[in-house]
Amino acid sequence: MTEAEDPTEAGSTPPDAASRRIAALLTELGPQRGGEIHAIFVLTATDELASVVATDEQGQPIQIVPPAEIMGLVRVHREASAVRPDGPWWRYLLVVSESGEVRTDYDFGEEPFPDEHLFPAEVYRADLEAFPRHRLPVWLAAHIGHADRQSRPAEMAALAQPSAAVVADELPPLPSLLARWAVLSAAFVAVESPWGPRVLPALGLFEGAERSGSSLWILPGDRAVLSGGVWNDPVLDAVYNSATPMPDLYAGAPAWVANATLNPRAGVGLLSFCYWWEGGRWYRASAPSASDISAAVPGVWSPESAAAIVAALTADEPSAQTRDAALALVSAADRRELGRDSLAEFFGEGAIDDAYLQLTMAGVSTG
């Protein structure tokens, strides 16, 4: 389903007889001469919920509570889909247009469900007993079976046995990484984009458009923790769908690499990588982890990679002059010399004060 929970022409499925019958019954419950009806049904073998909203002739939303007859038809409709190789659907979207056209879409869990449509783990376990599946989406398999295997409470971290860690040369040094993270954050804030990385005191956050993301915790004493998750990480896929042992991403990590400094994905079993900065070097465990973490980390890999993103925020095809100016911003941040005037000159006066605050919180501004 799309983010707007609205099937597109490409994503929708021609309505079958069951969907047309369900649509007809919902239409009878809606207002006369009304607008569209949007219905989302979320089902498992044991639990169900529905959200049905119609619009009246004034365009006002009206909530419809589907009766048992409709829910029974929806349940039979789901059970009929169990013949599919990937099992029955979990979410079913039905839209009836003002003209009576019926559109449908089915969600098999390719992307995580919204929180309000997510049942507890035991509900999905019961559904799998009723409708076994060969494979689950990684996020759902983790929801069901992570068993806190990636959790690292402080008391556990303090008792961890010493082991060797690997020097991680694939990351830029912390000062440069933080500076580029900050200038990227400032750039996205300056253009008033809800996307992109952000900076808080001692913390960098990033959530990518494709559900990968990471966090960067800065600790006193020139220490830091960078951890996060890659969407559909093949290592985690093997853990949850092929019973491969969970890699120990914390092997060799100091005690301060613990839940409080880890990305929240560790709490739901979706952490793909963990690095820590100590003594002027990045380290990681030798255990297998996501081979490509670029989707989960902002473009901090080089001054050029960061500058390319900054320039692209101002134009689809930035000029050479714009690219050079963006590189100058990144270089100034690397030197801890990026001032408000430079941001305003590049982006205009938009949200410059909020953007400059990102640099200030990261400690790379002139103020």
Image (tube, rainbow, N blue to C red):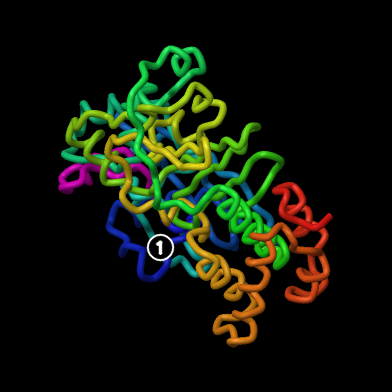
The spot of residue 296 in percent (x, y) is 45, 51
Q: Looking at the figure, which quarter contains the C terminus? A: bottom right
| Nearest the eye: 18 or 224 | 224
Q: Is residue 5 visible?
A: yes
| Nearest the eye: 77 or 257 | 257
Q: Looking at the figure, which quarter contains the N terminus? A: bottom left
Taking the view exactly as shown, the residue that stands out farthest to the front is: 279
| Residue 303 location, quadrant | bottom right
Quick check: is 90 in the magenta stretch?
Answer: yes
Q: Amino acid at mark 1?
A: Val
The spot of residue 81 in percent (x, y) is 22, 46
| Nearest the eye: 206 or 129 | 206
Quick check: is 33 in the magenta stretch?
Answer: no
Task: Tell me if mark 1 has few (under 14), some (14-19) or many (20+) residues whose alpha carbon lies within 10 angstroms of its own.
Answer: many
Residue named by callout 1:
102
In the image, is residue 355 above or below residue 79?
A: below
In the image, is residue 90 above or below residue 182?
A: above
Determine the residue positioned at 48% across, 52% down.
297
Q: Is residue 248 left or right of residue 223?
A: left
**Residues drawn in magenta:** 73-92
Secondary structure of residue under mark 1? strand
Determine the residue positioned at 34% across, 50% down.
110
Determine the residue positioned at 63% across, 49% down.
62
Q: Is residue 124 left or right of residue 55?
A: left
| Residue 57 location, quadrant | bottom right
The spot of residue 279 in percent (x, y) is 52, 36
Q: Is residue 4 visible?
A: no
Q: Is residue 123 left or right of residue 308?
A: left
Q: Is residue 115 left or right of residue 8?
A: right
In the image, is residue 340 above or below residue 80?
A: below
